[in-house]
Image (cartoon, rainbow, N blue to C red):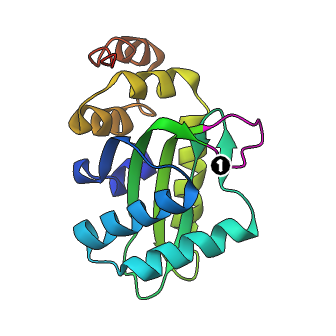
């Protein structure tokens, strides 16, 4: 099990979210965190915007990891969103973003925050991991991919490529 998967729950997987831009994405993250985790919407959105002003949280290859320290937060909260269609996000490679991992962490940043970020970068740097996520249409399947991917031997990872149902073509 990866460090990240400890904090990502099935209810924190949102598939095929349609937003026009980064600001609307941050607002959707804020609404989700308020509804599911009781975090104040304004604190989440403000934290994400403040962090993004310091530099883009986009990794490239269609991935962004917006993250923020949230006042009075007692635990790490993670959220995976798959966007459809992709949005512009000031990525280093110029590609639009489809995979978003939102992280809300207590302030000040702790070692666990850095471990989660390193784990997320490692996962999303793997094209096979991203491809497998994109095949899944069920949040529980996505959660299982996060749970098992990093600890899985290569042969199991290959099996995961065929694990999820093919994406629907609209």
Within 10 Å of the Cα at label 1, are there few (<14), some (14-19), or many (20+) other Cα atoms? many
Q: Quadrant of the C terminus?
A: top left
Quarter location, residue 83: top left
- The residue located at (25%, 39%) in the rendering is 139
- Work out whether residue 14 can be spotted: yes
Picture layout, residue 28 above or below residue 21: below
Q: Nearer the viewer, residue 116 or 38?
A: 38
Q: Residue at x 30, y 73 (%)?
A: 34
Q: Quadrant of the N terminus?
A: top left
From the viewer's perspective, is residue 135 above or below residue 93?
A: above
Residue shown at the point (56%, 69%) measured from the top left: 48
**Left or right of 70, for residue 37:** left
Q: Above or below — where is 22 with respect to 83?
A: below
Residue 110 visible in the current orientation: no
* Residue under label 1: 89
Q: Who's the residue at 34% across and 53% down the image? A: 8
Q: Position of residue 68 (x, y in %)?
A: 55, 71
| Main secondary structure type of the part rendered in magenta | loop
Q: Position of residue 42 (x, y in %)?
A: 43, 81
Q: From what the image shows, is residue 148 above or below residue 158? A: below
Count every numbered label the image shows and give the total: 1
What segment is highlighted magenta in the picture?
Answer: 88-96
Q: Position of residue 18 (x, y in %)?
A: 40, 44
Dot 1: what SS?
loop
């Amino acid at each position: 099990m990866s460090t990240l998967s400890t904090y990502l729950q099935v209810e924190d997987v949102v598939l095929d979210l349609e937003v026009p831009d980064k600001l609307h994405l941050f607002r959707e993250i804020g609404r989700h965190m308020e509804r599911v985790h009781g975090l104040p919407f304004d604190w989440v959105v403000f934290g994400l915007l403040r962090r993004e002003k310091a530099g883009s949280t986009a990794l490239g290859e269609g991935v962004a990891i917006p993250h923020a320290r949230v006042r009075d937060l007692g635990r790490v909260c993670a959220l995976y969103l798959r966007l459809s269609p992709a949005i512009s996000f000031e990525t280093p490679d110029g590609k639009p973003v489809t995979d978003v991992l939102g992280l809300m962490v207590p302030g000040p940043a702790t070692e666990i925050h850095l471990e989660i970020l390193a784990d997320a970068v490692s996962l999303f740097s793997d094209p096979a991991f991203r491809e497998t996520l994109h095949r899944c249409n069920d949040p529980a399947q996505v959660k299982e991919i996060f749970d098992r991917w990093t600890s899985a031997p290569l042969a199991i990872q290959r099996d995961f490529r065929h694990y999820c149902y093919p994406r629907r073509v609209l």
